[in-house]
Image (cartoon, rainbow, N blue to C red):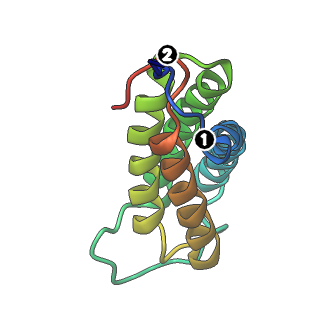
Amino acid sequence: MTQQTQSVRPERNGLAEGGAVFAGVLMLVNGILHIFQGISAIAADDVYARINAYVYKINLTGWGWILLVAGVIVVATGAGVLMGAAWARVVGIVITSLGLILQFLFLPYAPIWSLILIAIDFFIIWALATWHPEGRAAL
């Protein structure tokens, strides 16, 4: 009788692995863009359109600080994803989800740019959620 042994090694998904590396790079770039967006909102309130009637109205200086801090955290997490840090995958999903919400709230100030960043955030969340580093369990 022939006995077949099954490997305990998880199946590798090349698309998810490549997507995770790409997600790490996108997080670095996205974080740097958040930093620049925050700096421009802090430095000059006239860079973005003025919104008079908006439910989630925060002055642009406040948005600038929020985006600046979020950008620094996203850059650090993106570097962690690229280095394969165990914490970076979960933190990346959480911080990118928060970044997606921030961009939704920032939508009236820069609609096209916010939609682009929302789409990028969706991809990053998907890539990090489907990527399972070798030897690590799923979330």
- Judging depth in this view, the residue of 113 and 134 nearest the camera is 134
In the rendered view, tell whether residue 21 sits above or below residue 67.
above
Label at residue 13: 1
Residue 14 horizontal/vertical position (percent): 68, 41
Residue drawn at the location 64% of the way across and 70% of the way down: 113
Mark 2 highlights which residue?
A: 135
Residue 91 horizontal/vertical position (percent): 42, 30
Residue 109 horizontal/vertical position (percent): 53, 73
Which quadrant of the figure contains the N terminus?
Answer: top left
In the rendered view, tell whether residue 138 sits above or below residue 96.
above
- Judging depth in this view, the residue of 35 and 92 nearest the camera is 92
Residue drawn at the location 59% of the way across and 48% of the way down: 38
Q: Secondary structure at mark 1?
A: loop
In the rendered view, tell whether residue 50 sits above or below residue 75.
below
- What amino acid is at disc 2? Gly
Crowdedness of circle 2 by 10 Å Cα count: few (<14), some, many (20+)? Answer: few
